[in-house]
Every structure is written in C-alpha cells, then in structure tokens.
Image (cartoon, coloured by chain):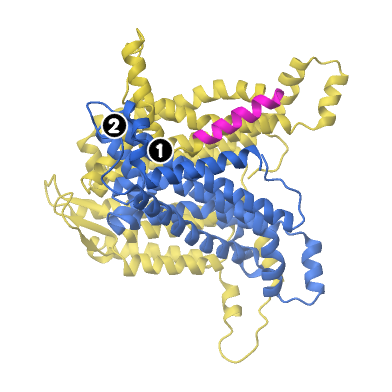
C-alpha cells in the first residue's frame, strides 16, 4: 500500500466514523462554538443528509452522462457531423453560465426542493462529459477504425466494441470532473430547500456557528477527494486494460 | 462550411423504397433549421410569450403572442418570426444567417418591450409583465442560428471582439431608449437602481480584484514550482484540496480567522478587514483562483520545446534571460487561458458572496429566491451571465491574439 492509499483509507474511516457517531467528535468542534451553542449539527441525521447529497449528485451525474454520451455519439457519426461545430460552441458557451444562476432560474419552473437542484446539476454536468466524450470518440485512430471495418463489423458493432471501449478512459475523466463539480455545487441546492450538506453549512452561517460550517465543508471535501481518487484509479485501470500509457497520474 | 459540404457528399439520399423519401426531402433544408423551426413553432404557438402579474409575487397570467400584442403589432411580429423560421430552414451563406439570427433576437427584444408597454395598466407601479417560456425559447432558437453561423465562420479574434461590441451597443441602445422600461426586470431595477450600481461595483471588485491578486502571486508561484519539482507537487496538491471545498463552506470558514485578525491585529479593521462581508469573500475567491493560474503557468512553461531552450542556451542566454525572453512569451497563451478560466469562474462564484454579506449580484438572486420574486432573481442572474459570457469572449480573443500563427486552441 502506498502512502496515498493509506491516507485515503484513513480519511474514509474517519469520515464514516464521524457520520455514524458524530457526537464522539464533539470535543474537536467545541472550541469553534460560542455561547454554548451545540458543536454538532443535530437538526437531522448527518448520515441521511450525506446520503441524500450523494443521491442527488449520483442521479444528476448519471443522467448527464447518458445524455452527453448519447449526444456525443450522434455528432461523431456521419449523419450528425453537421451539428458538431454548433454543439461544441454551445457547450463552450454553456460552461460560462454560473451554477447559482442556473439554479435560481430553474426555481420558478420547478418550484423549491430537490428538482431545481437536480436540473441545475444535470445541465452543468453535461458539458465536461460531452467535451470529453467527443475528444475520446474522435481520438480513436483511423487505422483502428479501418481495421474494425475490414473485419466486417457493422457501424453499431464498431461503436460498441471498438470506439466506446477505447474512448472510455477519456469519457471517465469528464464524468469525474462533472461528479466533483456536482458534489460541491449541490451544497448551493440548500438555498432552494434541497436536502444536501449545504443545509449544515447554511445553518452554521445563519447562527454564526463555525463548527457547523466546518463540519459540512469537511464532509463534502472528504467525499470529493475520495470520489475523485476512486474514479482516477478506475481511469488508470481502464487505460492499462486498453494498453495505453498511464497519463492520469499527476 | 467544410463539415456541411462533406456531409452532403458523404450521405446522398439513397433510400428508394415506397412512401415519402424523407432524407431527400430533408437534404433540401438546413437540418439545424428544421430543429429551429420546430422550436420556433413551439415557442410561438404553444407557450406563453409573457406573464402578466397584478403585483410582483402574485400568480401570473400566461399570455400568448396574439393576446400580448394588439393589432397591428401582433400580426406584424408573428410574420417576422415566421419569416425568421423560414430563413433558418433555407441553406444560406453563414454571414447572412448570422445577421438574420441577431436581427431576429433584436426583433424579439422590441416585441417584448412593446408587449410590456401595451399590457401595463395606466399609471400602475405594482403590475409586472415578465418574459415567459415562449420568449426565452424563441431567443434560444434564433441564438442557435447565430451560434451555428459563428461556429462555421471561424472568425478571427478582432472580428469577434467587434461583434461583441456591436451586440453590447445594441443592448445598450435598447436599455437607454426606455423600450424595456415596462418589462419586469427593469421595474425591479427602477426600484433599486442605486443598490444595483453599488452591488455591480462590488461584484466587479470581487471578481477582478481576486483575479489580479491571484495573477500577481500565482504566476511567480508557478515559475518557482516549474523550477522546483518538490515545491510543485506540494503547491499543486494543496491547491487541489482548496478546490474541493464547496464554495459556501470556504466563504463561511474564513469568517472566524478574519474576525480574529480584525479584532487582534491593530489597523486591520481600519483597512476594511472584518469577519463577514467583503474580506472573506475576496480571500475565498483568491484561493479558488490560484490553482488554474499556477497549473497553467507550470504547463505553459513546460511546453517550451526542448530544442528552443537549447538554442537559447547556445546563444549564451542566462537562465533568467531564457525565462523572460523565451519561456514566458511562449507560455503566455496558456497562462492567459488560465486567467480566462479564473475570471469566468469568479464572476459566477462572486454571486455566492452574498450569503456571507459580501455583496455582489448574488444579493438580488438570494433576495429573489427568498421572496419567490423571479424578476428580482433575474435582475441578479442576467447581468452575471452576460458578464461571464463577455469575459469569456474577450479573453478567448486575447488568447488567440497572444498566440500568433496558431490554430485557435479549444
């Protein structure tokens, strides 16, 4: 086990321990409170809130992956090539939209709660996945595609058995970036009453309780690091399986 | 242009079975145009163009184009939109399609203003006419036509800047002429003009101030990290961790240390340092800004081709000269690309500063969410989006200008 892996395991264990028995960590957060305010957020179970946060992130990222990869497949086929320049410039422009603005504009259409958050995270997550899926699919070399055609594969077979597997590691990079952004942006969802860890942070902000802010922030930060590293490890595995040089290590 | 003609050659309509030959029919039309025409149909026929509200938080009454506009304006505008859909359907040179797209968006703006003025009860200060789904969908459809034309034309950086200036001028004229004065967002503006201007200043100060500080510190830090591998790993890893902290939390976490500084370090509070408000927001944005700038500086410097570096050394340049005369100029486009990422990101993130009393356009967004007053949300969100897009266009052009003779990097 490398030093990094040990640190990640420790981080995961501490995170789980904190979520399951938050009160045992009270002495750590006590110095940050004033006037005898509670040191640990207790208006809801931290496990429930964290699971809801992860659920929102997961659903939004999965939906974004399905749609973005589908669109990327369409615009990299001959019949959709006409839309490639436009779709790239839309995703370029779309990335300049601030997530708060997307979230705020989704509220009048969908009301308060989880839905506007899901929509905002979904829309915001599309772009990195789409860009990377296009890069991955158009990065499959001509020789490989010709060889697949020479073997008598149909268009669908080439896509499913050659192009998608080869593009997968690059696509996964986009999914990872998107998931980490969604995880962190989901906290803003609490301003429109979605059940996410932002609830803990905002409770801290409104009652001037730094302990709450720190708890919420640390849980999200730890989740982001763990998910980022986990998906990065998966990318390395896929690259190795594809026989490509390991370029994800930074 | 290339993609389209190539595509037309690659897939000639070949199906010759019975029934209507759809692909042959479709090949006469612009395929994007078909989509645009469908969106236009939905936006103008099925969805409300504006919403009328007796006051700003009352439930709205949706109105279609024919209900929102009187005779003769209504039919005239409907004809213009129909003509726009037809223009989108026909294959035309990109420059014409771009002009048509922009003119149609301007026409929609005019239409919105006329509808708002017509619907507003005489002398009413509380009624609101807001743009509704149909209006936004129509704008989106014609923006698609313009964006598609722009993507095909691959304009140079100066032309893009010129177009941006033209659009800004048009928008400014529309605002200045008073055409939109009866539209809900401007009604909200009229009620808080002074607050809007001061929050705009704060927003600018937050976004550009943190960018300036991050550039002043990030570029030298990037140069040092480029020279020293151990420092690089440490710096990039810790900046990566900063990026994972959600923005609300980072804003909040800085409250405590800054209140301590304000209370305990003489002169700090006189400089405007305090626990809540501007200072923690600025510091948080600065923290988020460092990673892209440091990482791009390192990447840009590393990308200097080894033969170039050796040639410089062969000419007798010192290490310092190689850095300032060879490596940094070559890395400049990549460093500016980092600055672009930071500026666009900061303009968006600065909205969150409002949650800790830091000001900026976010004040209106969160007030609007709190009062379920959508027009107020838009008063904060629309300038933020416009500012971020303008910043992206300007800095993309600067990146192109800084990398002469190179294809536009994406």
Q: Which chain: blue?
A: A
Q: Which residue is mark 1?
A: A217
Q: Which chain is home to disc 1?
A: A
Residue situated in front as seen by the camera: B155 or A185: A185
What is the secondary structure assignment of the residue under circle 2? loop
- Badge 1 crowding class, 10 Å Cα cut-off, few under 14, some 14 to 19, many 20 or more, is many
Question: Dot 1 lies on which element?
Answer: helix
Reading the image, the residue beneath label 2 is A209
**Picture disc at residue B76:** none
Q: Is residue B130 left or right of residue B144?
A: left
Residue B66 x/y as whole percent: 26, 66
Could you tell me which quadrant the C terminus of chain A lies in? top right
Magenta stretch holds residue B227: yes
Report the chain shown in yellow. B
Tell me residue A153's x, y (percent). 75, 76
Extent of the magenta region: B226-242
Asked whether B18 or B240 is in front, the reply is B240
Q: Determine the residue positioned at 23% across, 41% down.
A: B188
């Amino acid at each position: 086990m490398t030093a990094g892996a040990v640190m990640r395991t420790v981080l995961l264990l501490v995170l789980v321990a904190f979520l399951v028995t938050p009160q045992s960590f009270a002495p750590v957060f006590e110095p940050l409170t004033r006037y005898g305010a509670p040191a640990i957020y207790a208006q809801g179970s931290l496990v429930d809130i964290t699971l809801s946060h992860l659920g929102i992130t997961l659903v939004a990222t999965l939906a974004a992956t399905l749609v973005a990869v589908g669109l990327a497949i369409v615009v990299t086929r001959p019949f959709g090539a006409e839309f490639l320049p436009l779709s790239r410039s839309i995703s370029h422009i779309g990335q300049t939209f601030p997530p708060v603005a997307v979230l705020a504009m989704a509220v009048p259409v969908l009301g308060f709660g989880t839905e506007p958050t899901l929509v905002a995270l979904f829309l915001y997550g599309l772009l990195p996945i789409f860009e990377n899926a296009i890069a991955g699919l158009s990065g499959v070399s001509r020789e490989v595609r010709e060889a697949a055609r020479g073997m008598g594969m149909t268009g669908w077979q080439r896509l499913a058995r050659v192009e998608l597997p080869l593009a997968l590691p690059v696509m996964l990079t986009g999914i990872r970036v998107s998931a980490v952004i969604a995880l962190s942006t989901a906290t803003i969802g609490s301003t429109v009453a979605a059940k996410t860890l932002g609830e803990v942070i905002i409770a801290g902000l409104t009652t001037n309780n730094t302990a709450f802010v720190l708890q919420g922030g640390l849980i999200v930060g730890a989740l982001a690091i763990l998910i980022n590293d986990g998906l990065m490890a998966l990318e390395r595995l896929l690259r190795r399986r594809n026989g490509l040089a390991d370029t994800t290590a930074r | 242009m290339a993609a389209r003609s190539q595509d037309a050659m690659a897939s000639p309509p070949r199906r010759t079975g019975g029934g209507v030959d759809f692909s042959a029919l479709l090949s006469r039309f612009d395929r994007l145009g078909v989509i645009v025409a469908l969106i236009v149909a939905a936006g103008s026929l099925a969805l409300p163009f504006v919403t009328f509200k007796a006051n700003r938080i009352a439930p709205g009454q949706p109105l279609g184009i024919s209900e929102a506009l009187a005779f003769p304006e209504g039919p005239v505008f409907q004809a213009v939109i129909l003509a726009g859909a037809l223009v989108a359907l026909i294959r035309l040179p990109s420059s014409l399609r771009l002009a048509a797209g922009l003119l149609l968006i301007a026409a929609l703006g005019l239409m919105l203003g006329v509808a708002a003025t017509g619907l507003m009860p005489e002398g009413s200060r509380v009624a609101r006419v807001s743009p509704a789904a149909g209006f936004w969908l129509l704008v989106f459809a014609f923006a698609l036509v313009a964006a598609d034309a722009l993507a095909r034309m691959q304009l140079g950086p100066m032309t893009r800047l010129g177009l941006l200036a033209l659009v800004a001028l048009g928008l400014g004229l529309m605002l200045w002429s008073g055409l939109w004065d009866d539209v809900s967002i401007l009604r909200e503006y009229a009620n808080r003009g002074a607050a809007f201007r001061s929050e705009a200043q704060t927003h600018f100060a937050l976004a550009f101030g943190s960018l300036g500080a991050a550039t002043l510190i990030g570029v030298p830090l990037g140069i040092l990290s480029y020279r020293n591998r151990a420092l690089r790993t440490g710096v990039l890893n810790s900046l990566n961790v900063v990026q994972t902290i959600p923005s609300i939390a980072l804003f909040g976490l800085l409250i405590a240390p800054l209140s301590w500084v304000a209370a305990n370090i003489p002169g700090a509070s006189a400089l405007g340092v305090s626990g809540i408000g501007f200072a923690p927001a600025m510091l948080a944005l600065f923290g988020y800004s460092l990673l892209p700038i440091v990482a791009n500086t390192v990447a840009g410097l590393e990308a200097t081709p080894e033969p170039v570096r050796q040639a410089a050394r062969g000419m007798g340049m010192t290490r310092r000269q190689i850095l300032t005369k060879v490596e940094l100029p070559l890395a400049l486009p990549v460093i500016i690309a980092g600055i672009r990422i930071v500026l666009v990101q900061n303009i968006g993130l600065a909205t969150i500063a409002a949650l800790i009393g830091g000001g900026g356009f976010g004040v209106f967004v969160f007030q609007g969410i709190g009062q379920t007053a959508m027009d107020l949300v838009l008063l904060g969100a629309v300038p933020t989006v416009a500012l971020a897009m303008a910043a992206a266009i300007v800095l993309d052009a600067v990146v192109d200008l800084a990398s002469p003779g190179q294809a536009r990097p994406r």
